[in-house]
Amino acid sequence: MISFDAFVLAEGVPIYQQILTFLKRGIAAGTIGDGDELPSRRVLSALLGVNPNTVQKAYRLLEEEGLIQSHTGAKSCIVLSGGRGERVKRQLLEEDGRRIAAALHQMGLTREEALALIDRYWEEGTQ
Amino acid sequence: MISFDAFVLAEGVPIYQQILTFLKRGIAAGTIGDGDELPSRRVLSALLGVNPNTVQKAYRLLEEEGLIQSHTGAKSCIVLSGGRGERVKRQLLEEDGRRIAAALHQMGLTREEALALIDRYWEEGTQ
DNA sequence: AAAAGTGTATTAGTCAAATAATACGGTTCC
DNA sequence: GGAACCGTATTATTTGACTAATACACTTTT
């Protein structure tokens, strides 16, 4: 069963997108693997304190991407066969890499200052 | 007159927030300085292809933060006195630093892999 | 078999973001 | 002084995110 203990609800970003991002980053990190069971819509919505429909929207989008398999009545589970896992990781690294580098550059940081900033907050992110 | 040539409209983020971020990053970078004139609401909305009310919302929020001064009839301009510029840069670095480090860590990257990723897309961000 | 849990679907409502169309008074510039 | 531009304000509408309350059929568990 996939754990949502590390999930923290942020503001200003659609909740269903945060769920997508959380799961995809877990897939990229390898902490979420092929065949892993997802919490049911009802359980996760109660856990996060959001509406079941919001979780359903996230799960539906994941299924449309082929990353989840759902059968009426049974729990949904992760599908990473056919290079899906590698694809997710590659896409995530490229999108985040571009976005992050652009942000740091727009703030006028040099390459060294940017690397130093990541270094500075790296320890905090490990908690 | 502050240039919005480098501004590119993204999806999934409120437009008024994108305008705020663009200006704050310019302030942090030093490319936007004290007393600089902003494009009028009408001109900028036409330039970005968005509604004047959306630009007005961004400008109003900036004024509430004390980063803009507006007088009815005249153009608005940037106010960075009293350490406002430094404050903006410090806040931006902390927020982005934390968010970026957390994202990289959640993807399971080591510190070295994270720094390599930034390095990889650094050149692209320069354009 | 019965109960509990699950995926799925529907309808209704609230709220924020964004658009659209004006309107008014003040400033700038020729 | 007048035209052009500017900040500001108002009202209405559309769209998407989210909540709320159900309902139904299927699976799992006991």
Image (cartoon, coloured by chain):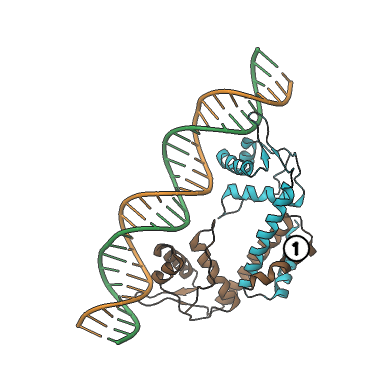
Chain colours: A cyan, B brown, C green, D orange
Give the left or right position of residue C16, taking residue A121 as reference. Answer: left
Q: Residue at x 44, y 64 (%)?
A: B49
Query: Based on the displayed image, in which of its 4 quarters is residue A62 positioned?
Result: top right
Q: Nearer the viewer, residue B24 or A32?
A: A32
**Relative to B120, does residue A126 appear above or below in the rendering?**
above
Percent coordinates x, y for residue A27 in the rendering:
73, 48
Q: Chain of mark 1?
A: B
**Relative to A36, does residue B45 appear above or below in the rendering?**
below
In the rendered image, which residue does mark 1 sit on?
B114
Give the left or right position of residue A55, taking residue A87 as reference. Answer: left
Does the rendering let one see residue A7?
no
Q: Residue at x 74, y 57 (%)?
A: B105
**Relative to B97, does residue A21 appear above or below in the rendering?**
above
Does the rendering let one see residue A88?
yes
**Relative to D25, does residue A77 appear above or below in the rendering?**
below
User: What SS does tag 1 mark?
Assistant: helix
Q: Residue at x 72, y 49 (%)?
A: A26
Q: Nearer the viewer, residue C28 or B85?
A: C28
Give the left or right position of residue B98, taking residue B79 as reference. Answer: right
Residue count near mark 1 (Cα–Cα under 10 Å), binned few <14, some 14–19, many ≥20: many
Percent coordinates x, y for residue B99 in the rendering:
66, 61
Query: Based on the displayed image, in which of its 4 quarters is residue B96 positioned?
Result: bottom right
Percent coordinates x, y for residue C11 in the rendering:
43, 33
Q: Amino acid at mark 1?
A: Ala
